[in-house]
Amino acid sequence: MCELLGMSANVPTDICFSFTGLMQRGGNTGPHRDGWGITFYEGKGFRTFKDPNPSCKSRIAELVQEYPIKSCAVVSHIRQANRGGVCLENTHPFTRELWGRYWTFAHNGQLTDYQLLATGRFQPVGDTDSEMAFCWLLNQLEAKFSQRPTDPDELYGFMATCCDELRKLGVYNMLLSDGDDVVTYCTNNLHWITRRAPFGQASLIDEDVTIDFNQETTPNDVVTVIATQPLTNDENWHKMAVGEMNVFHFGEPIFNRVASK
Amino acid sequence: MCELLGMSANVPTDICFSFTGLMQRGGNTGPHRDGWGITFYEGKGFRTFKDPNPSCKSRIAELVQEYPIKSCAVVSHIRQANRGGVCLENTHPFTRELWGRYWTFAHNGQLTDYQLLATGRFQPVGDTDSEMAFCWLLNQLEAKFSQRPTDPDELYGFMATCCDELRKLGVYNMLLSDGDDVVTYCTNNLHWITRRAPFGQASLIDEDVTIDFNQETTPNDVVTVIATQPLTNDENWHKMAVGEMNVFHFGEPIFNRVASK
């Protein structure tokens, strides 16, 4: 298993607090020693930091924790390898261009028979089930829509049915973003929380760190954080249901669908 | 104008020495204040560090200088904006997947009528002439070859004619890599040097730094460095000709072609 961390915010926000908690799971409080990565969007552009080394020992992870890169959309992943070797081309997140935007993807879980997925022109570079699933998903989207649908329900309604197909192959927890929207799909473990005024305090589970968001935010800030497991022990995280997809647009939910049993 | 820096080596080599020289041109000894980026390949995977801020003031550039990431293929760029605003999506290098490999591109120069270039499925995300040219080039390659030709002369011979077309639109100096090969195309300013045993000393032009490569290398190392302008003042750099393409494969030249007048 791996751990996912995502953020969607209405103002550029640094994720140092949550990232600090997540990184401890990369070999210290968690077993995820097989690499980590984080993508920060700035407008339509993005920056990805990744390392096949354990995050708790990574010099680059230190930089990301100390150097607050502010972003409205973040996708992060720490890896415990199951499918595919430990190397840079197998390290999440993965980014590809579709419809003139960069889409960034991270997956938690394990799929079977993923070799049968048809990816068309989106050819995997590494050999993980995750990158195969991402390429298949992009190929499905491009085959269905020659350009991006203007109606989010049309786009994400179809994307949800594609994710349902992937869930049939095993455990498929997903984070996906184009910089404006952060998409989440849950098979078994995915939690989210939206922080907005009045802001309170929060304490990390994985490290002795407490933050007072009043000191860090303005009253208009809306910041949604998505994580495999709750990162704080004194806030009310929502657990996503099996087959639930949520889309957050600059912090606010714009799409929700739970697959029928 | 911008500055390009590339490296092709037969053993994973750090580029800190050359990068230190280049970064000084990002606002100190040079006018290139509009962002910088560097891509390091490790096998088929890659890591890109980029920043729209001047490299001479960039915290991330400091990390890259201090933290020796060893790679066999590097593409780097510092920018003085001409076409396209100063933002992350316009910051080189640009990376796209073709034939199951990541191709990374950086351009120095300025093109006219680039809006007319047909990019097919490779849609630009930013609004630079450079990304347009890259997308057009990939579209040409994919239209010509459904999969990668096994003969490098077939691939790079065709790529050279595509670059000749781009040169008709203005100044087109290019660095391109898939991690195994580093491709260079010259319109006016591109220099290269191959360092191999017996190694000597070299002194940076842009900063008071001298290195003794004997201390840094083994007798079997072959390291080719490509740069817009020579980075050292006590080595013999080769200047590329107008319309010259060179391809270096793990340090060694494997393809050369100069366009007929």
Image: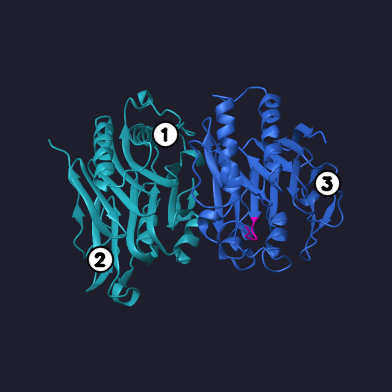
Chain colours: A cyan, B blue
Is A211 located above or below residue A35 in the figure? below
Kind of element beneath mark 3: strand
Is A59 located above or below residue B173 in the figure? below
Measured in 3D between alpha carbons, the distance from the residue under mark 2 to the one under mark 3, in whole angstroms, is 57 Å
Residue A164 can be seen, yes or no:
yes
Which residue does the image show at 23% across and 72% down from the upper left?
Answer: A197
Instruction: State which region is magenta.
Output: B78-82
Kind of element beneath mark 2: strand
Chain letter of mark 3 equals B
Q: Nearer the viewer, mark 1 or mark 3?
A: 3
Apparent side of residue B189 relative to residue A192 in the rendered image (left or right): right
Where does label 3 land, which residue? B239
Where does label 1 land, which residue? A128
- Crowd band around label 3 with a 10 angstrom C-alpha radius: few (<14), some (14–19), many (20+): some
- Crowd band around label 1 with a 10 angstrom C-alpha radius: few (<14), some (14–19), many (20+): many
Q: Quadrant of the C terminus of chain A?
A: top left
Coordinates of residue A108 in the picture (x, y in percent)? 32, 42
The reply to whether callout 2 and callout 3 are in contact (CB within 8 Å) is: no
The answer to which image quadrant residue A34 occupies is top left
Which residue does the image show at 44% across and 47% down from the upper left?
Answer: A102
Instruction: Determine the residue located farthest toward the left in the rendered image.
Output: A261
Which numbered marker is on residue A54?
none
Where does label 2 land, which residue? A195
Name which residue type carries label 3: Lys
- Tell me the chief SS of the magenta region: loop
Q: Nearer the viewer, mark 2 or mark 1?
A: 2
Q: Quadrant of the N terminus of chain A?
A: top left
